[in-house]
Each structure stands twice: as C-alpha cells, then as structure tokens.
Image: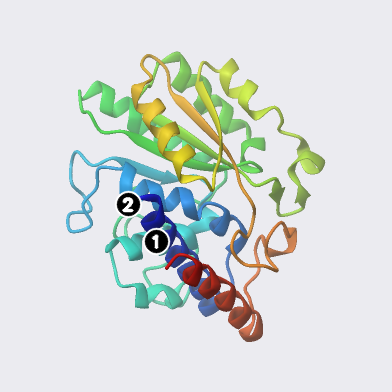
Amino acid sequence: MDNLELKRYANAVRKGIVTAVHGAKAGHPGGSLSAADMFTFLYFEEMNIDPKNPKMENRDRFVLSKGHTAPGLYSVLANRGYFPVEDLPTLRHLGSYLQGHPCMQETPGVDMSSGSLGQGISAAVGMALAGKLDNKDYRVYTLLGDGEIQEGQVWEASMFAGAHKLDNLTVIVDNNGLQIDGKVEDVCNVYPIDKKFEAFNFHVICIDGHDFDAIRAAFGEARATKGMPTAIIMKTTKGKGVSYMENSVGWHGKAPNDEEYEVAMKDLEKIDESLR
C-alpha cells in the first residue's frame, strides 16, 4: 500500500475517532489522534490479520496498553472491516459492544482487554513468550503512552522481555509529550525513553510517528532484529489533525460539543481534499 492510500485511511480513522467520542460525549481523543497513523499502518500493512477470521490462530497480536485510547483502536478496526463504521457513535453507550476500554469478549478484533495503565505490556510479553514456547511465528505488538511508562509494571515486563530475548515482540511508545495532568516531563519526567529501553536489552528505534516511510522502515528493522525485543519510540502530536486539539493537554480526555465537532470534521475534510 502506498503512502497516499495510508494517509487517506489514517484520516478516515481520525474522522472515526472524533465521531465516536462526540457520540459518546466522553472519551479520549488526543492520544487516539496522535496514534492514528501507527494504528493505520499496523492494521492495513504490517500485521498478519483477517477481519473475517478475527481469532485466526496464527494471526499477529496487538495489545492497546494505553487502553483509554480505545476510540483509535475501534476506528481502525471498523475501517479495516471488523465491524461497521456506522457503529462508532455508539461508543460507551449502554448495551454497545464498544466499551470505554477494549474488551476482548465483546469487540471483534480486540486481542486483549486493557485499561489499567501499565498492564497491557505485561499481557503482550506473555503472548510473545507463548509464541516462542509453542514454536509459532506470529508477532506481538503493544502500544504504550509516554505517561503510561511512569508505571513500574512497564519496566518489570520490559526486563522480562529483554532477559528472555523475545524478538517477536515490538513495543511502541506514543511520545506525544502530554498526559492528563500536563507535560510528561513536568508530571514525572520519563526521559530519556530510548536509553531506558536500551538498558533493558531492547533494540531501540526513534522515529517521527506521522511519517509512513519512517514507520515502514522501523517495522522492517524490528522484524529483522534477532535475539532481542524492539522498542519503537515515536514522536507525535497529541490531537493530530484537529486544529484546536493539537498539542493541547485539555483534549486528553474530553469530548467535543456539537460546534467543536463540526470544526473538527471540517479540519479533517480539508486533509481529505489535500489527499485527492
């Protein structure tokens, strides 16, 4: 798939995120939008998956460790064909299968329930170890927030992954620089992120998380790396694509009202026009 097509899908994913959060009148748009390009690349190019057979035994696995950005995961799953895009506005509604955090029992395509920060990477490490023990060739991917890596469990899991040389595991950190209470460096400084993962015996790649050439090269490098897990640290813009949300900590966990929704969709329509 060429970059132009990926950009079009990524913009559709962003529209789905905004539509879902607006429909719910709650949710987390900022970190969903910052990861939309990565979600798109994973599900449209990188991973071995089949929307018609979500439980395919040898599929690649994805764990959304920063589970509050479920709108991003749901939007890419819908756009990839796991369920109707028209269902996205039911996010967080009573009776909807699109809960506020991913639920593997309810939502097609979700490989692991998540939401408690720090725990998703541990599940991903377990999946990667199981793949090794069972001599399977599937790969495991997990996406963490940069604020999330303040959790100690992240580093316990990373130590285990490095010690057991889980080269079928790719950890992705969405480094948009903001968390619910402000700048990550002000709340509890996590930098240097790359050196921390290197200390836990990871192969580390730092990229622009909105550059599809860089994303493609990083995953190719991860697949080629043997004897150690890979961490991809991607620099991103929180709220990417929506003018008033970009780099604004206030949009970490807030839904747009009707007027704000219209502005957001116009912003994304302009991006669509530029990609025609």
Q: How is the image coloured?
A: rainbow
Is 207 positioned to the left or the right of 192 in the image? left
Q: Which mark is residue 44?
A: 2
x then y, percent, for residue 74? 41, 62
x then y, percent, for residue 78? 34, 65
Dots 1, 2 in contact, CB < 8 A: yes
**Residue at 52% across / 20% down in the picture?**
159
**Residue at 71% across / 56% down in the picture?**
247
- Which of the two discs, 1 and 2, labels the residue nearer the N terminus? 1
Identify the amino acid type marked 2: Phe
Identify the amino acid type marked 1: Tyr
**Residue at 36% across / 69% down in the picture?**
97
Is 191 positioned to the left or the right of 49 in the image? right
Location of mark 1 (residue): 9
Quadrant in the picture for residue 268: bottom right
Q: Which quarter of the figure is the C terminus placed in? A: bottom left
Circle 1 crowding by C-alpha within 10 Å: few under 14, some 14–19, many from 20: many
Q: Is residue 113 visible?
A: no
**Residue at 35% across / 72% down in the picture?**
85
